[in-house]
Image (cartoon, coloured by chain):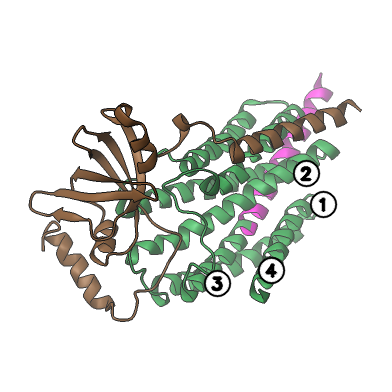
Chain colours: A green, B brown
Amino acid sequence: MVGTIILVVVTLAVVGGVLGFSLRLVGMAESSVRRAGTMAGVGALVLLALGLYLGLVWAPAERLMGDVYRIMYIHFPSWVGTGAGYLTAFLASIFYLKTRDPGYDYVALAGAEIGLLFNVTGLITGALWGRPTWGVYWTWDPRLTTTAIMAITFAGYLVLRAFMEDPEGRARASSLVAIVGFVNVPIVYFSVRWWRTLHQVQSSPETVDAPIVWALRTMMVAFVLLFVFLLAQRFLLARIRGEEELELMKLEVAGD
Amino acid sequence: MKKRLTLAVGVLVVVLIFGYFAFGGLGRSLVYFWTPTELLAEGDAAYGTSVRLGGMVVPGSVRWDADRRELNFQLADEGGTIEVYNAGIPPQMFLEAADRKEPIGAVVEGTLTREGVFRATNLMVRHSEEYRAPQHGEDKQEYYRELFRDQSSGGAE
């Protein structure tokens, strides 16, 4: 009971901290973003090394799957990164529509793009894991199908952005896509409980042996830090490009 | 005011979609697999149509002929049991669970024949949400050795 409460509190604190950071990027100076990014990046490197050691060497094999299960140490945290990315895109899009501050548009783009990166990583590691254990790389069960739709939605988000010239119209249209697209994320999460699937339901510390849990937690925190690092870099890039774009438009207007 | 209304309608639509997904059942035609009970309840209509059938493998029912690469086992849920035949090598995890007579789920694609045997063209194994270290008495080294020997000789003992 106490363990569960601690777990929930820590999880909420991490999620709140990451999302708070994502949204605060908008008002931050470049040097602060870089500093925060570097700190997260160093932390990610250290924890990735530790987590991979714990997962690949220290933790035991799984009794039915043997060593194959160890791909979970990449597979599971990838979905944590996916959720963090799309949630960031979702919230930043809402903030954009409320404030029309292009800064939130940059955060949303960064979140969506990095979310998609983790999403694809999760799909690939899942397929590689599925072949030796389930017997197939892919099957159209509800979990896998909704996950594929999620990836296509956010890939569509990026395509849409690439095709729209006007920064304001692009930001508005893509905000809507991110908000509507995000509705699918909780559906992906609950799909294994709502419908019959080949994919198993969520594990919990009760259904997983302690060493495996600790290795997974380490990898999860490592991926969250990796997400923060990537988000900071991607946000800066988007902001530099966005400001250049606005500058160029002003010049064009002046030139007319 | 108009914005509020749009927002309220949007939220309502999302809630309805969620409610439909969560409690609407989505109709039988859309389920990922049928259970043995459901398939048997179809009576004559069950024969000859391609379906996905899912359930738990009955412990001790697995007969794997490594030379002929033929697999027979029973798939069951609370209300029914169906004999399944599959040609081809099953995933290692399936045989591993069968060896230890441990509960494991499976989903097969194929058709139910008039003889009452489900001829599967594809066998998929379900893993539970449990991740456990090899238990006491299951020597890890020995386990790996067996695993590799099995694979190098194409699954034959």
- Decide whether residue B55 is among the magenta residues: no
| Residue A193 appears in the figure | yes
The type of residue carrying mark 2 is Gly
- Mark 1 or mark 3: which comes first in sequence? 1
User: Foreground residue, A241 or A120?
Assistant: A120
Identify the element where label 4 is drawn.
Answer: helix
Identify the element where label 1 is drawn.
Answer: helix
Which secondary structure type mostly characterizes the magenta part of the structure? helix
- Look at mark 1 in the image and give the residue it sits on: A27
Mark 2 crowd level (few <14, some 14–19, many ≥20, 10 Å Cα): many
State left or right for residue A108 relative to residue B114. right
Mark 1 crowd level (few <14, some 14–19, many ≥20, 10 Å Cα): few
Q: In front: mark 3 or mark 4? A: 4
The type of residue carrying mark 3 is Val
- Look at mark 3 in the image and give the residue it sits on: A46
Q: Quadrant of residue A14?
A: bottom right
- Mark 4 or mark 2: which comes first in sequence? 4
Q: Distance between the residues labelled 3 and 2?
A: 31 Å
Residue range highlighted in magenta: A228-256
**x then y, percent, for residue A102:** 78, 39
Residue depicted at x 21% and y 66%: B147
Looking at the image, which residue sits at the far bottom?
B136
In the displayed structure, would residue B116 be above or below residue A10? above
State left or right for residue B116 relative to residue A225. left
The type of residue carrying mark 1 is Gly
Residues marked 3 and 4, same chain = yes
Q: In which quarter of the image is the N terminus of chain B?
A: top right
- Look at mark 2 in the image and give the residue it sits on: A103
In the displayed structure, would residue B123 be above or below residue B61? above
Mark 4 crowd level (few <14, some 14–19, many ≥20, 10 Å Cα): few
Identify the chain of the residue marked 2, using the numbered disc in the image: A
Residues marked 4 and 2, same chain = yes
